[in-house]
Amino acid sequence: MGDSGKGMIDISDRDRTPRRAVAEGILVADQETVEAVRSGRLPKADPLATARAAALLAVKATPSLVPHCHPIEVTAASVDFEFSKGSIRVTCEVHATDRTGPPMEALCGVTTALLTLYDMVKYRCPGASLQRIALVEKEGGRSGHWRAEGAGSEDGGNGSLRSD
């Protein structure tokens, strides 16, 4: 390609291998709003089903949204919700078999799920916020396994980092 920094990175010499990435983020809102999401008592639609569907669509659309992101063969994706007082933790896990991994797909999925939840609650909790969106784990490929220290904890996995 010649000019470095002017296009997508060439990954043609890499082997297609199984890879996995997990991203998470948190929606912070008042307890009544969190409970309304948990129980599905919002006027627009079922918030969890809608956020999950939006996340899965975003995972598949990532290369169309992020200019330097390679299209990859996504083999599985899941979205989970964990409730605590005043917050909802969203986790998006993506599996792929390709020459590059799915961290961008996991991040795009979790961010879209959070944005969808925010859209559905903003009328009742305008102070709701999205926090600590981060890649918390990835494995496969040349870099092997990496996990953010404290991933899944109250600090959102954004503490110090370590590689296995």
Image: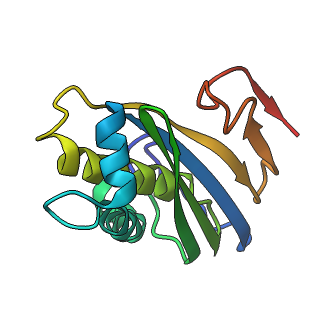
Where residue 132 appears, x then y in whole percent? Answer: 48, 30
Tell me what residue is drawn at x 88 percent, y 40 percent. Answer: 164
Q: Nearer the viewer, residue 122 or 77?
A: 122
Where residue 103 appears, x then y in whole percent? Answer: 56, 52
Tell me what residue is drawn at x 16 percent, y 40 percent. Answer: 122
Image quarter of residue 136: top right
Q: Is residue 21 left or right of residue 79?
A: right
Q: Nearer the viewer, residue 57 or 113?
A: 113
Where residue 5 appears, x then y in whole percent? Answer: 43, 40
Residue 14 visible in image: no
Q: Is residue 97 left or right of residue 58?
A: right
Vertical comparison of 143 with 63: above or below = above
Vertical comparison of 129 with 38: above or below = above
Where residue 77 appears, x then y in whole percent? Answer: 55, 70
Image quarter of residue 34: top left
Vertical comparison of 123 with 60: above or below = above
In the picture as drawn, the residue positioned furthest to the right comes out as 164
